[in-house]
């Protein structure tokens, strides 16, 4: 069983590396950012509540995002494991995830933190914004999202250090180099 968290600031390559990992280990994938964007597109109650927050680069409140993740998990069949991409982003979410998985007799097996300098993140996200059409890939929002990452999300690392599942990966390099480093760590830490 490989339950993997792919962690890092916006623009660190979580989505890209997730897609390689899904293929390599035949995993299920959840991106809470994508779940939220679908809710917004479908104009659900939660979607309407969070539309403006997302556009401003703020985090969705814990109780809402935890509810969405809980609903998503309930619908999943048994698999080789799950890649959590963009979740948890607060320590409260990390605790909630531990509790949810423990109900299935599981835990997070590895937390991979992609490290990328701020200047590189901004460049990547500005570039992505010209193609993605995402409402939050604009310079002012990008800077805010990185600030929120540093202040609220980065402390989640401490939780996984205590769990002995935290691994730091240099997120600058070619996609392949970074992927090779990640799989080496996964193969060391999981079975
Ligand atoms: P992402 O696609 O992961 O960059 O997420 C896009 C946006 O969705 C974030 O900037 C947040 O506003 C929101 N979001 C996604 N995941 C979470 C989460 N785990 N907790 C709070 N907000 C989230």
Image (cartoon, rainbow, N blue to C red):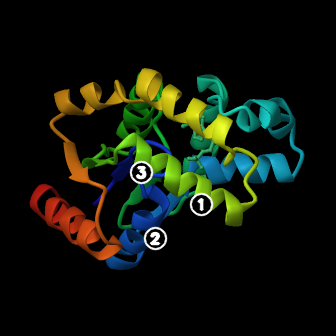
Q: Earlier in the sequence, mark 2 or mark 1?
A: 2
Where ligand 1 lies, by quadrant?
top right
Residue 162: image x %, image y %? Answer: 18, 27
Which residue corresponds to mark 3?
120
Q: CA distance from mark 1 to mark 3?
A: 11 Å
Q: Is residue 74 above or below residue 102?
A: below
Q: Element type at marker 1? A: helix
Q: Residues within 10 Å of mark 3 (few under 14, many from 20)?
A: few
Residue 65 versus residue 176 in the image, above or below: above
Which residue is drawn at the image coordinates 34% and 44% (left, top)? 117
Say which of marks 2 and 1 sits in front: 1
Residue denoted by label 1 = 127
Horizontal side, residue 78 vs residue 114: left or right: right
Residue farthest to the right?
43
Q: Nearer the viewer, residue 110 or 126?
A: 126
Q: How many marks?
A: 3
Q: Is mark 2 within 8 Å of ligand 1?
A: no
Rendered residue at 43%/35% (across/down): 97
Residue drawn at the location 73% of the way across and 32% of the way down? 56
Callout 2 touching callout 1 (CB < 8 Å) = no
Mark 2 — residue? 19
**Mark 2 surroundings within 10 Å by alpha-carbon count, few (fewer than 14), some (14 through 19), many (20 or more):** few
Q: Assess whether mark 3 and mark 2 are in contact (beta carbons under 8 angstroms).
A: no
- Position of residue 68 measured from the top left corner of the image (x, y, whole percent): 65, 40
Disc 3 CB within 8 Å of nearest ligand 1 atom:
no
């Amino acid at each position: 069983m490989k339950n993997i968290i792919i962690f890092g600031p916006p623009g660190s390559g979580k989505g890209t590396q997730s897609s390689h990992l899904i293929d390599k280990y035949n995993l299920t994938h959840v991106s809470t950012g994508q779940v939220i964007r679908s809710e917004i597109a479908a104009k659900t109650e939660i979607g309407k509540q969070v539309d403006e927050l997302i556009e401003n680069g703020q985090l969705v409140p814990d109780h809402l995002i935890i509810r969405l993740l809980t609903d998503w998990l309930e619908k999943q069949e048994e698999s080789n494991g799950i890649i959590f991409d963009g979740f948890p982003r607060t320590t409260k979410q990390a605790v909630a995830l531990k509790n949810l998985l423990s109900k299935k007799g599981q835990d997070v097996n590895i937390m991979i933190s992609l490290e990328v300098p701020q200047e590189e993140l901004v460049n990547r996200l500005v570039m992505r914004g010209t193609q993605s059409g995402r409402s939050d890939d604009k310079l002012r929002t990008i800077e805010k999202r990185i600030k929120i990452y540093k202040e609220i999300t980065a402390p989640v690392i401490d939780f996984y250090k205590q769990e002995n599942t935290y691994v730091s990966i240099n997120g600058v390099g070619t996609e392949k180099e970074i992927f090779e480093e990640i799989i080496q760590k996964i193969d060391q830490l999981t079975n």
